[in-house]
Amino acid sequence: MAIIGIIGGTGFGNPDFLENSCTAKLHTPYGAPSCLPVTGQCNGVSMVTIARHGAAHTIAPSRVNYRANIWAMKHLGVTHLIAVTAVGSLREEIAPGHIVFPDQFIDRTACRAATFYEGHEVCHIPMAEPFCPGLRQILADTAAGLGLAHHAAGTVITIEGPRFSTRAESRMFRAWGADIINMSTVPEVVLAREAGICYATAAMSTDYDCWHASEEPVTWELIQKTMDRNTANMRRLLLAALPQIRCGSCNCRNDAASSIL
Ligand SMILES: [Zn+2]
């Protein structure tokens, strides 16, 4: 049976849609997760949620304990993980409020623990298809069914932050083929694969970053305003997608098992 995890980002940390919710007090070998995971049910589906930036949104992207968060999800039996994240758009056609389900990432992070295997074991995990194709398909089909403006694929570039990009960087990322930009997908997606958890991202576009000449440069205030306006859509999407998620025929689990030397 599938157990669904949600790691909520900006504007999606509160699990008030859960029935029989309770907090799981646990310790991980990597220290404390961003907050105590909340377990419960939603329309009969077992779920676990963690607010990526902490219950009060006080943890910067570079300081999120990604390993503790993923370890906690695995420990609580999570089979499928949906990561909600705010992103800047690097493409005209991805307007603020649109939802993107990326199929690729580019890693521009610099100082984050990005593997569980630092001891005697070495793990070379395949990453040609970093996001679970089955889970992405369910999310995209659900968004289409609800009539939500969305993009079924795309490349997300994750930067270290906490500063936003310069205009030159933003233009370079466009030239590289990136479609959206954030500060949190890597290493979360990599650790999920190492843990054998199916992982997909539902990315909410909040702004046009700074490449877009006619737009105001991105600010935190702008991001928050757009997220507030669009959180209801993200919630509709997740609640409709949850009951359709089943353990399927993807390779996410096998890749993890066969990559440890
Ligand atoms: Zn999968």
Image (tube, helix red, strand yellow):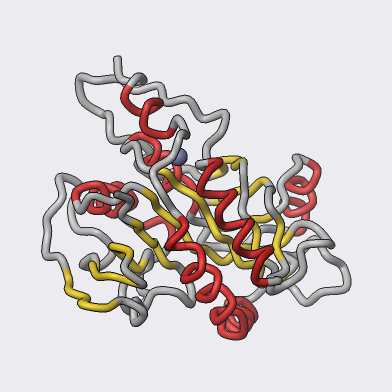
Where is residue 138? Give x, y as percent: 55, 53
Quarter where residue 258 is shown: top left
**Front one among 84 and 46:** 46
Residue 101, position in %: x, y?
61, 54
Q: Is residue 33 left or right of residue 64?
A: left
Q: Quadrant of the C terminus?
A: top left
Which quadrant of the figure shows ligand 1? top left
Residue 229: percent from the left, percent from the top?
61, 85
Q: Relative to 175, is 235 above or below?
A: below
User: Which picture quadrant has residue 195?
Assistant: top left
Q: Is residue 140 left or right of residue 120?
A: right
In percent of the image, x 37 and y 26: which residue is there?
Answer: 254
Q: Residue at x 40, y 21 (%)?
A: 124
In the image, 143 versus 94, the foreground residue is 143
Q: Is residue 164 above or below residue 232?
A: above
Q: Position of residue 134 (x, y in %)?
A: 53, 43
Task: Determine the residue positioned at 34% across, 76% down.
Answer: 15
**Residue placed at 49% from the left, 67% from the top?**
238
